[in-house]
Amino acid sequence: MLLYEAFARLVSLDLQWFVELTMNNIFWLFVFTLITYVYCGMKWSWKTFLVTIFWFWISIPFLSGTLGLAYLVGGLLFLNYTSRLVVLTFTDTIPSLKDRMPLVMFLQFLAVLIFYNYFLV
């Protein structure tokens, strides 16, 4: 439920909470920075960085089910990366979508997450 708390803190302009969250989780800040750097072809992008953080915040409540984290993550990652290969290959052929790769990746993940939770778990 960290995502809901973050939205509430953002609406109330509690910026100190975000600074404390960042400083208490400095390791994850570097992990998200590395993921962003790798996904953007060894370049930095704020848009991809924020999408990556939002992506993980959304997926945390869904991945902690009763069957165990490893079982859920294994099936989700298989479905996610298999469909990502198809979606990104298709998106790469459309010139107007090449600039929106982080958004396409995020929407693809949300679709896989919803499909996985409703039909496979």
Image (spheres, rainbow, N blue to C red):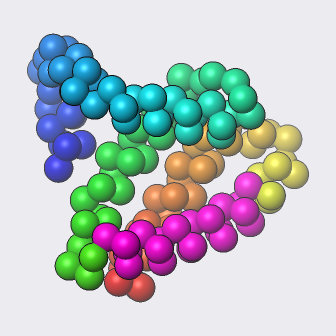
Question: Does the magenta run of residues contain 61?
Answer: no
Quadrant occupied by the C terminus: bottom left
Given residues 72 and 108, the one toward you in this image is: 72
Range of magenta residues: 69-88
Q: In the shown orientation, is residue 84 left or right of residue 118?
A: right
Question: Does the magenta run of residues contain 79?
Answer: yes
Residue 18 position, x and y percent, is 22, 22
Using the rendered view, name the quadrant where residue 54 is placed.
top left
Task: Report the number of numbered marks.
Answer: 0
Residue at coordinates 38% horizontally, 48% vertically from top-left? Answer: 56
Residue at coordinates 73% horizontally, 55% vertically from top-left? Answer: 88
Q: In the shown orientation, is residue 35 left or right of residue 29?
A: right
Magenta stretch: dominant secondary structure: helix
- For the question of whether residue 101 can be seen, the reply is yes
Q: In the shown orientation, is residue 94 left or right of residue 81?
A: right
Residue 116 position, x and y percent, is 43, 76
Using the rendered view, name the quadrant where residue 34 is placed.
top right
Residue at coordinates 65% horizontally, 40% vertically from top-left? Answer: 39
Residue 72 position, x and y percent, is 38, 75
- For the question of whether residue 18 can be seen, the reply is no
